[in-house]
Amino acid sequence: MSNTAQPVDVVFTKGLPKIELHAHLTGSISRECLHDIWETRKARDPAIDLEDPLVAIPTGKVDYDIKTFFPLFSSYIYKLCNNLPSIQYSTKAVLQDFQADGVVYLELRTTPRAMPGANLTKDDYVSTILDILKSHNEQTSNTMRAFLILSIDRRNTVIEAQEVVDLAIKYQSAGVVGVDLCGDPAKGDVRIFADVFARAKVEGLKITLHFAETELSASDMELSTLLSWKPDRLGHVIHVKEEFQRIIKKENIGVELCLSCNVHAKMITGTYSDHHFGMWRHGGVPVALSTDDVGVFCSPISQEYFLAAQHFSLGRDDIKALCEGAVESIFGGLNEKARLGKLYAKWSGWSS
Ligand SMILES: CNc1ncnc2c1ncn2[C@@H]1O[C@H](COP(=O)(O)O)[C@@H](O)[C@H]1O
C-alpha cells in the first residue's frame, strides 16, 4: 500500500513529529495543572481569594469568544500564576504536554510579566522560563527542542514594548528567537510600535505578528502598517483581503493557523471546513498548524493535524509537505532546520 493510501488517523497524527510555532505559554497551561497550582497555594494559604480553576474554567468548556477570552487571563490565570513556583511548575508542565503529544520543535511565546507581590521583575520572569527551557533541551531523552518568543501586548506603551525588546536582545543567546505582537485585537494602535519592531529586526530577532484576527484589527491602515515592518511570520491571518494576501505570498511570509481556536472563539464564520487553512494551504507560503491556547481550547496539535486532514481530505503525503513547509519558517536557525529536515526524511511512520 502506498503511504498516500493509508489513512491519517489519530494514531498517525500523534506519532507524527510535529512543529508548534504559535503557542502562548499562559494559554497553554492545562486546567489540571492550574488546579494543582491552586491546591498547593490553598494548602499554604487557605484565605487565598481565588476559585478552583476547575470551577472558574470548567472542564470541557471551550466556547470562549474574543470578548470572554482575554479576561480569563487578566482576571484569573495571572492572579493564580503570580509567583516563582507557579511559573516554574506551569512552564515545566506545558513543555511536558507538548513533548508527550509528539512535538519535536516548539516556539513558545510569552508576555514578560512583573510580579511585584512576589518581588519578581520582568527580567526574572523571562530568565526563569529560559532556565526551564534550557534544562528541558539539555535532557537527552527529550526529543523536543524549545525556544522562546517574547510578546508585546497591543495595550503596552512604547516604553513597555521597548523593554520587551531589551529582554529579547539580552536573552537572544539563551534561546529567545523572536518578538511577537499579541493581545486583545480591539485594543491599541499598532502604529506606535514601528520603531520597536524595527529595532528588534536590526538586532537579528525574528518577528511574528497577530494579523487580521478580527475585523476590528484588519483595517487597511493596520494591515499595511504591520506588513511594512517586514514580519517573518503572521498569526491567524483571517480577515485579509486579496491585496494583502498577494503581498504575503510575494514575500513568502509564513502563516500560523489555529483551527480550533478560530472555530471555538467564533473568529471565523462557519466551522472547520470553512477555515481559511483551505485557502492558505494552496498559497505557496509555509503554513504551520498551531494550537494558540491549548489550555483554553483543549485541542492538542496532534488533534489539529487530524482535524485538518479530516476536513480538507489530506493524505499522509499532504501532511508531509505541510510539515516540511513549516520547517522553512522556524526561527530556531539552520541547525534546527537541518535536524528537522533529517527527522522528516528518516521518519518511518509515513508508511507504517
Ligand atoms: C485568540 N488568540 C489570541 N490573540 C491575541 N493574543 C492572544 C491570543 N491568545 C493569547 N494571547 C495573548 O497571550 C496572553 C497569554 O499568554 P502569556 O501570558 O503571554 O504567556 C494573553 O493575555 C494574550 O495577551
Image (cartoon, rainbow, N blue to C red):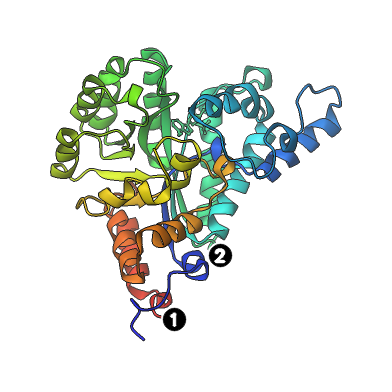
For the point 54% across and 45% down, the residue is 294
- Amino acid beneath label 2: Ser
Q: Position of residue 162 (x, y in %)?
A: 36, 19
Classify the position of the N terminus by image quarter: bottom left
Whether label 2 lies within 8 Å of ligand 1 gets the answer no
Mark 2 Cα-neighbour bin, 10 Å: few <14, some 14–19, many ≥20: few
Earlier sequence position, callout 2 versus callout 1: 2
Verify CB contact (< 8 Å) between mark 2 and mark 1: no
The residue to which callout 2 is attached is: 141
Q: Nearer the viewer, residue 182 or 72?
A: 72
Q: CA distance from mark 2 to mark 1?
A: 23 Å
Residue situated furthest bottom in the rendering: 1
The image position of residue 209, as x and y in percent, is 33, 33
Q: Is residue 285 left or right of residue 142?
A: left
Q: Front-most of 85 and 27?
A: 27
Residue at 29% across, 64% down: 321
Tell me: residue 129, above or below residue 327: above
Quadrant for the C terminus, please: bottom left
Looking at the rendered structure, the secondary structure element under dot 1 is: loop
In the picture, measured across the screen, residue 15 lies left or right of residue 315, that is right
In this rendering, would 28 be left or right of 225?
right
**Residue at 58% from the left image edge and 42% from the top image edge:** 295
Q: Which mark is residue 352?
A: 1
Task: Looking at the picture, tell me which residue is in the foreground, 328 or 83.
Answer: 328
Mark 1 Cα shell of 10 Å, populated few (<14), some (14-19), many (≥20): few
Three-letter amino acid code at disc 1? Ser
